[in-house]
Image (cartoon, grey):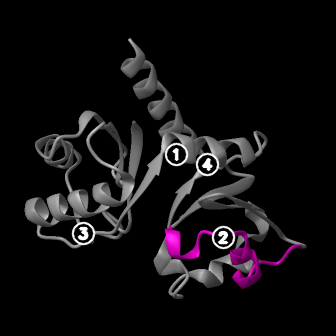
């Protein structure tokens, strides 16, 4: 199976510094195959036939603790999970000088469409959609500070998600597809 491990809160503002080469080696040391990291924000694509998602969370969080001495939350996204997100993500959404678009990946405890009712968004300014496993959010860059979703920061809900911009999400998906192709060869 092809998975992405999304680490929450590393290399942000100088906190929880994790070197990607060392992280890759830690994943390989616990048996992950075809390990590829993408940018410094904790995105690791890998394959394994030995573990299910819940086992992977425990195994990889322990490997990070053992290697770096940091208690980092790991969200595991399967290729199937990512395909559901990508099928809902509008192709026109970008992250550039005109538009900000993010994917808020959800931990299982809040992964339900009813999460939309708990979000502080302003429909007149921002677009919010649910995809199984994620919230998709887009807003015009000119009004980003007026949007309601920025009020999520620091809340209990915010602690149960990890955010990637759409460009990063698309790249992770591309790496996952490449890993799947590699498995079939």
* Residue 85 position in % (x across, y down): 64, 49
Where residue 168 is drawn, which disc sits there? 1
Query: Callout 3: helix, strand or loop?
Result: loop
Where residue 112 is drawn, which disc sits there? 2
Quarter of the image with the C terminus is top left
Camera-side residue of 66 and 50: 50
Few, some or many residues within 10 Å of mark 3 (<14, 14–19, 20+): some
Few, some or many residues within 10 Å of mark 2 (<14, 14–19, 20+): some
Residue at the extreme right: 124
Q: Which residues are magenta?
A: 107-123
Query: Callout 4: helix, strand or loop?
Result: helix
Between label 4 and label 2, give the one nearer the viewer: 2
Where is residue 90, by image quadrant? Answer: top right
Camera-side residue of 74 and 2: 2
Between label 2 and label 1, give the one nearer the viewer: 2
Q: CA distance from mark 1 to mark 4?
A: 5 Å
Q: CA distance from mark 1 to mark 3?
A: 20 Å
Q: Is residue 129 magenta?
A: no
Q: CA distance from mark 3 to mark 2?
A: 29 Å
Instruction: State if disc 4 and disc 1 touch (CB < 8 Å).
Output: yes
Q: Earlier in the sequence, mark 4 or mark 2?
A: 2
Few, some or many residues within 10 Å of mark 1 (<14, 14–19, 20+): some
Q: Which residue is mark 4?
A: 166
Instruction: State if disc 2 and disc 4 touch (CB < 8 Å).
Output: no
Residue drawn at point x = 65 percent, y = 46 percent:
84
Quarter of the image with the N terminus is top left
């Amino acid at each position: 199976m092809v998975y992405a491990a999304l680490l929450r809160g590393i290399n942000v503002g100088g906190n929880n510094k994790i070197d990607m080469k060392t992280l890759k080696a830690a994943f390989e040391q616990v048996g992950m195959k075809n390990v590829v990291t993408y940018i410094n924000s904790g995105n690791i694509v890998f394959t394994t036939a030995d573990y299910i998602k819940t086992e992977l969370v425990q195994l990889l969080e322990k490997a990070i603790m053992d290697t770096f001495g940091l208690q980092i939350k790991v969200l595991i996204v399967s290729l199937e999970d990512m395909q559901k997100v990508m099928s809902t993500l509008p192709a026109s959404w970008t992250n550039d000088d005109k538009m900000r678009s993010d994917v808020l990946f959800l931990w299982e405890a809040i992964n339900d469409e009813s999460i939309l009712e708990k979000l502080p968004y302003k429909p007149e300014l921002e677009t919010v959609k649910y995809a199984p496993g994620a919230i998709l959010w887009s807003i015009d860059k000119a009004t980003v500070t007026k949007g309601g979703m920025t009020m999520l920061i620091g809340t209990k809900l915010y602690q149960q998600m990890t955010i990637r911009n759409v460009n990063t999400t698309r790249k992770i998906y591309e790496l996952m597809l490449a890993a799947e192709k590699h498995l079939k060869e």
